[in-house]
Image (spheres, coloured by chain):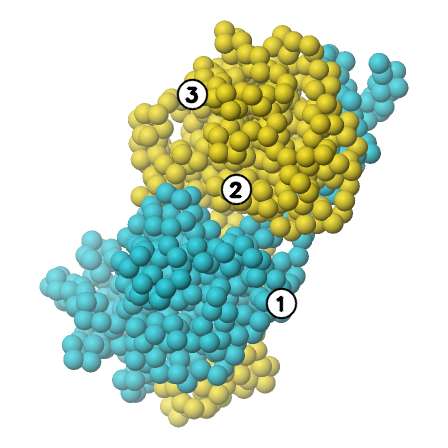
Chain colours: A yellow, B cyan
Amino acid sequence: MAEAVVRELRASFTAGRTRPVEWRAAQLTALVRMIEEKEADISAALQADLAKPHMESYLHEISLAKASCKFSLKGMKSWTKPEKVPSAITTFPSTAQIVPEPLGVVLIISAWNYPFLLSIDPVIGAIAAGNAVVLKPSEIAPATSSLFAKLLPEYVDNSCIKVVEGGVDETTDLLEQKWDKIFYTGNGTIGRIVMAAAAKHLTPVALELGGKCPVIVDSDVDLHVAVKRIVVGKWGCNNGQACIAPDYIITTKSFAPELVDSLKRVIKRFYGEDPLQSADMSRIVNSKHFNRLTSLVEDKKVADKIVYGGQTDEKQLKIAPTLLLDVPLDTALMTGEIFGPYLPIVTVEKIEDSIDFINSKTKPLAAYLFTKNKKLQDNFVTNVPAGGMLVNDVALHLTNPHLPFGGVGESGMGSYHGKFSFDCFTHKKAVLIRGFGGEATARYPPYTQEKQKILRGLINGSFIALILALLGFPREKR
Amino acid sequence: MGSLAEERALGYGGLVSDLREVYESGRTKDLEWRQSQLRGLLRLLREKEEEIFDVLCEDLGKHRGESFRDEVGSLAKSVEDKLQNFKKWAAPEKASSLLRLIDSDCSQPVYLAATPLVAFPATAFVMPEPLGVVLIFSCWNLPIGLTLEPLSGALAAGNAVVVKPSELAPSTAAFLAANLPKYLDSKAVKVVEGGPDVGEKLMEHRWDKVLFTGSSRVGRLIMTKAAKHLTPVALELGSKCPCIVDWLDSNRDSQVAVNRIIAAKWGTCAGQACIAIDYVLVEEEFAPILIELFKSTLKRFFTKPEFMARILNKKHFQRLNDLLDDPKVASTVVHGGYFNAKTLSIEPTILLNPPLDSDIMTEEIFGPLLPIITVKKIEDSIKFLKSRPKPLAIYGFTRNEKLKRRIIEETSSGSVTFNDAIVQYGMDSIPFGGVGASGFGQYHGKYSFEMFSHKKAVLKRSFLIEFMFRYPPWDDSKIGLLRHAFRYDYISLFLALLGLRR
């Protein structure tokens, strides 16, 4: 079945359907219309899949998707133009340019936590770059998946953009086909499987994976503002089920009590006394993840460190915002990506120690620092490798389309957003145009001493050597 | 860490962890260090030039003229370019973070950031950082260039590096193993010699990036092993690079074209290069003219056998010999065809229309055999190319602007060069790399630096401005305010903030 889909898309691509900028613009414009007209349906699907509050759906998925579409619509004209670049003296006279071209037929495998945005955003990039696309939405967010299957054919060119729904079997079938690029958002385990499958066909991949995103909190901050941002960045982002949500906090032993107090106050303010009843919090996506999360705090070693929250409602699949303090570092909670509403706080002697702590773990997708201390900021930016980083806020960097969004090391490879999405699905073809003039016999055998001398000068950029070469030196007997 | 022999027996774990330690110490990130390494490379190229010519001659029978042109000369220029620019490339690059309220070419306010108000104000920049400890697999046909060009990029980007030269060019491998530690920081740059088993052992480890130049078969193995560790890879693979030759009216143009094609086939490691011209496409009527010109020019150029490289080894010699086994192929030879097994040299050989399903037309030739395929109209060559795997380079000799445009727009390849060949390799301003079957990842010039870098996004905010509608509990009025913000309807937002503020 996947084979038939790929065959059809390849035929459409080879026929040139996706190349004209007008076609690409028409698809993107249709997507904008789809998002505007079907906003209620999208929000309802997200509510069904994740109990996502309407505000989050709007703020984090719908509006970002629309903005991404519009940004690409506006930028596409200049992005698709060839870029002139300087030519070299050795090839004088010549002109050189870089011509962007689509890779061909691409596969986009999306994730369940931001099932609308993480599907549509890469699709926007692929279309803007002129590719034919297959979107495989996550089956763990079934309402959104079937919404895509129903809506996309109504709005976009179905001969070039297709939705394939399904689980492991369908995904495996898709991964066996030959693609020109595979874009995967999800976890490292599946990421490895995707890359290994791609290797069989020498298909390049982009992997948007996760990690443990640390938040360093210094004592010199405007604490109330900092904590509000941390709280909304953690539990206001799909209840912690986001690749860029804060995974754990690092602060000094002396500052921890004040920080914990402030966190408690803000959590109460935002989610009330009984957060399980709050309509402003997403639920855990399914019972598998619910059980995964609750088992993280089963061990008494961990449970004893809970300083706030911990309530769960299995029927509703809800877990309350939970704070833990100084959990033993060898526990599962502290070694694996949490992806849920638990927020452990790690304490260190000096705030500078937090840099080494972060660097002792694998490179995260995002790293955050709250401080007014410029030296600490510089130390952080220079010495902590991460996909991206934010100082004095959380998560927002992904909203700036001028910044590349992607991981490094275990958190992934490749980046997108804004023009980077376009580049992700583009091949930058180098084009060198020479004429028949400027014939330098010095390049050809027989390789005499004189020729080598001139060639040496020419390659070293010597203008005189160039003139000599162009004048036909050394002269040959015919 | 033990000797390299011990390391080999133990699987190189010690080597990798030592390099990681060196990298973590921050030594290679230092800009002064990077500068010293690039300078070291330049000194190596200058001081050891004669020795480099010697080893290339030993390994491949390359004439020093060719070695200078294709490996030493362009490489020195390229390293010089990196030396001059790496500081600029390593500096943080500002990104726009402000919202532009009015767009210049339309009357409606248009935004640049998705949540401008919520994220305002902020400073944004992209910070390049080294990937860490990287591995470079080189190839045997340009054993100096294919090792040192990516090495210079990795060093300029601040990485620790392991280089694995091809064992099929043993003199060059030994040269690199002996000299790189002398001219570079031997604690952070290592040369590991050996064959496929060594490559396999090295790939058992996690790297921060791997660059592989070689065949598709091995490329697949490398990427499969890399997947286990989520090691990002760049693959520079082979392909059949076609050369489209249009009808050229003037004799001078034809001669220039032939000169350049000959240089790009037999003058470049005897055709054993990923960007060498593999075969020619030409109109039926022009073919005989072209063939005559080839014959006469070949005689003029290759007056001595030493002016053409030899075939790498017996295995490849036999492989090329076998391409002419099929009598249907052998009968199409119109020039050359003499194979000297003793000296491992093959004279420049031209074939006219061998069967398209024969090995010589389906596999990468990588040798001094040049098939000429005729078409009725030169435009037919575009369709011919579209049905075949994407090559590393497409060449076209033509004055027809329309044909040039069609080739650029309707075919896909790593690069396209008109009216010359191979020369694109030495340019630092254009990226070098394949697409589709010819690989992925690009380098040369600034692209070499970027290949071994991660561009980290950084956003900085202040505590000053807060918008309360960002936080729960959320209700309709907050959503309403946000909608105004997102529609960039600032007047309504302003009024709303004044009037509706709770």
Q: Estimate the spatial distance between the alpha carbons at disc 1 and disc 2, rounded to whole Å.
A: 28 Å
Q: Amino acid at mark 3?
A: Glu
Task: Name which of mark 3 and mark 2 comes first in the sequence.
Answer: 3
Judged from the image, the secondary structure of the residue bearing numbered disc 3 is: loop
Nearer-the-camera pick, A378 or A414: A378
Q: Amino acid at mark 1?
A: Glu
Q: Is residue A13 left or right of residue B496?
A: left
Q: Which mark is residue B32?
A: 1
Q: Which mark is residue A472?
A: none
- The residue wearing badge 3 is A139
Q: Are marks 1 and 2 in contact (CB under 8 Å)?
A: no
Q: Is residue B331 left or right of residue A312?
A: left
Residue found at x 35% / y 25%? A168
Residue found at x 33% / y 45%? B224
Question: On screen, A211 above or below A170?
Answer: below
Judged from the image, the secondary structure of the residue bearing numbered disc 2 is: loop
Q: Nearer the viewer, mark 1 or mark 3?
A: 1
Q: Is residue B124 left or right of residue B499?
A: left
Residue B244 seen in render: no
Q: Quadrant of the C terminus of chain B?
A: top right
- The residue wearing badge 2 is A361
